[in-house]
Image (spheres, coloured by chain):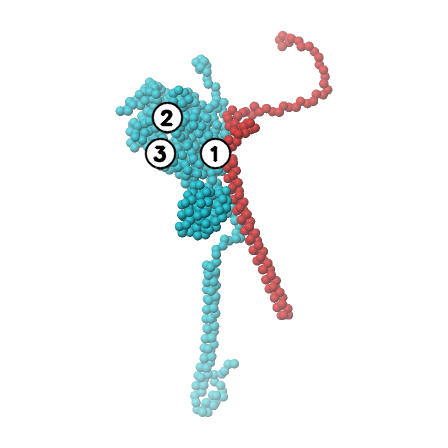
Amino acid sequence: MRTPLRPLARILQARQEGLNPDMIEKENLKLRHDVQREKARGRAQYRLVILCASFVMVFGAIGARMGLMAATEPVEPRTSAPGAEIIAQRADITDRNGRILATNMLTYALYAQPKLMVDPKGSARKLGEIFPELDAAALERRFTDGRSFVWVRKVLSPEQMQQVYDIGDPGLLFGPREMRLYPNGTLAAHVLGGASFGAEGVQSAEVIGTAGIEKALDARLRDPAQGNKPVTLSIDLTLQSTVEEVLAAGVGMLNARGAAAILMNARTGEVLALASLPTFDPNDRSSARTDKTAEPGDSPLFNRAVQGVYELGSTFKIFTVAQAMELGLVTPETMVDANAPLKWGRFKINEFDNKNYGPLLSVSDVIAKSSNVATANIALMIGGLRQQAFLKSLGFFDKTPVELVEASGSRPIIPQKWSDIVTITVGYGQGFASSPMNLATGYATVANGGVLIKPTLLKREGPTTGVRVMSEKTARDSVKMLRRVVTEGTASLGDVPGYEVAGKTGTAEKPKKTGGYYKDRNINTFGAVFPASNPQYVLVVMMDEAVDTTLSEARRTAGWTAVPVAAEIIRRVAPLMGLRPTLEPPATDALTAASN
Amino acid sequence: MRPVLYVLSFLAVIALGFWAYRENYATQAALKEVEGLQRQIVDLREALSVQRAEWAYLNRPDRLRDLTTANFDRLGLLPMEPSQFGAAAQVAYPKAKLPEISNSTDIQGTLAAPEEGL
């Protein structure tokens, strides 16, 4: 109820008493203001309390949630659906048809916690009995010297694991391991390389590639997002096994120190088989290591096809001749000076066995007879600069571009100064070393019509493109010449009926460490292209110190060693690739040829 | 009217509580089942990879070669050779069956030397 500011009763009374009635009004106004102020204060106080309470509640909620999150154990979301990548593992490696070359297997590692052990001495002795390669005394020392953790073995077989269980010591514990397994043993060992454990924990260990494609593609193989997608190689298991079988037989029969073979698709650059002997088992790479004093090139781990750089000898002649034809300097019928020996400064260029094919030889016969002198003359016609540029365009100055970690260390050995004598010797493949893989790439370029392709160990989808290095006509003529080497030249043992093998032999003496060349140690190479009428495949066979002793005199030339091995490889491998033997045109007999 | 509403809402709360309780346990059971299934999937995957490795191991070319050599009597398998390719024309077709002879007639005669000019 509103009190009046000037209540009539009090005003009248004040007037009677002679007081100022305005005072009454003022007093009442003051009282009214007091009441109003009191009310506003109360309301503001109430608002402040609400505000504080809400702040406390919100911060309290956030704090409580944070505390809860910090205090609880992290848990995997249980409801989310798992994908295929339940076990993040190293991807498999398969051949081009999906057959497994490398996969993973679950096994266990053995470790010990000596503090938990009941009988460290007895356990050490029993472990020594189970694993003969472990030193029981050393193990006992490590179990008893106060450390709390000891690795005993990296992988166990199930039988060994059971035996360790049977010891019954609570301090012997197992940690799960994914182990890399190569089910085919030594097959394609140099391609696959090997793997070992990297950082090791109790629950798991990382598997890292140590050589070959395992190391070169380590990042891809370890990528968890692609763990369930295998890496498909261009290698064909069947072809690889056949090539290795024949090559091994050849090495055995010819007493070679080693050998290498590369089978390549000339169109796509896919390597279908790559073998290097002697070989090793990638499952047990460490046992293949030889002593340090031996030459690294003799180790089974050494990949002769990719890592090894050799003077590949006369197989190079076809490049010299092809370039001369490309430049228009010669045609296959041009007659070239082949009068041996050729004197150049203080050097004397001889033919094999000191023969003389001169005075003149057609270019086609230069290749068929493998004349050093005539090739030297052709090389001089080309000149050093152009020769270098051509070999560079064929990839001979670069390391092999295949997906192997060893390839990066295989830089060809190129002469420092390219003088005329270098031009001459490189013309027939001396004084210039490159890997068999580089040679195979060069031959593939000749075979596929003059396009340089990049060799690869991964399966390729679709057509490949490359840089054109020589005209199609030059390449076709070169293949024709190579075919003549087999039909009537130095590689007559290389003829496989139906497959029109074309190729070039190369016999190079091995260089001595002290300088000069060994007379009785050769690197024999055969670079082959087949079938000649429509070249599809390239095969390079290289044999180290092979010697044919079936006849009274020991033969060390490629024609007697690498060529028959290559022929047998082609005979076995071509049907496996579905290559139909062609009906070759019957040789024109001498009478009709004469009557024409 | 009001007491009826109170009782009804109280009953509704009890019913909802019971429903939530059951849902909770059903969810936990489902989660447990999923966990079990996942473990089973992992185990099966492991077994699968082991079997794949074993299959590859048993089919390695060395072993197959040795087996074909050992069982040559029964299988007679040899490496594939170029001569094994053939033309389609070389494939022998099954002989067409002759229709049965019916209404046969006998013909008799003598063979004479062909006349000249024929």
Q: Relative to the observer, which residue lies in front, A550 or A36?
A: A550
Q: Residue at x 45, y 77 (%)?
A: A37
Which chain hosts label 1? A
Q: What is the quadrant of residue A442 in the picture?
A: top left
Q: Quadrant of the C terminus of chain A?
A: top left
The answer for which chain carries disc 3 is A
The answer for how far apart the CA atoms under marks 2 and 3 are is: 22 Å
Q: Residue at x 43, y 35 (%)?
A: A280
The furthest residue to the top: B116
- Quick check: can you spot residue A479? no
Q: Is residue A220 above or below residue A415?
A: below
Q: Earlier in the sequence, mark 2 or mark 3?
A: 3
Identify which amino acid the numbered label 1 is placed on.
Answer: Asp
Chain letter for the red colouring in the rendering: B
**Label 1 residue SS:** loop
Label drawn at residue A284: none
Read off the chain for label 2.
Answer: A
Q: Looking at the image, is mark 3 or mark 1 earlier in the sequence?
A: 1
What x and y, as percent, mark residue A225?
47, 46
Q: Is residue A36 above or below residue A348?
A: below
Q: Is A225 positioned to the left or the right of A513 in the image?
A: right
Mark 1 Cα shell of 10 Å, populated few (<14), some (14-19), many (≥20): many
Residue A182, position as x, y percentages in the image: 47, 38
Q: Which residue lies under the disc numbered 2?
A: A507
Marking on residue A295: 3
Q: SS of the residue at dot 2?
A: strand
Q: Answer yes or no: do the residues labelled 2 and 1 have beta carbons within 8 Å?
A: no
Compare marks 2 and 1 and give the one earlier in the sequence.
Answer: 1
Kindly identify which residue carries mark 1.
A236
Q: Is residue B43 visible?
A: yes
Of all chains in the rendering, the one displayed in cyan is A
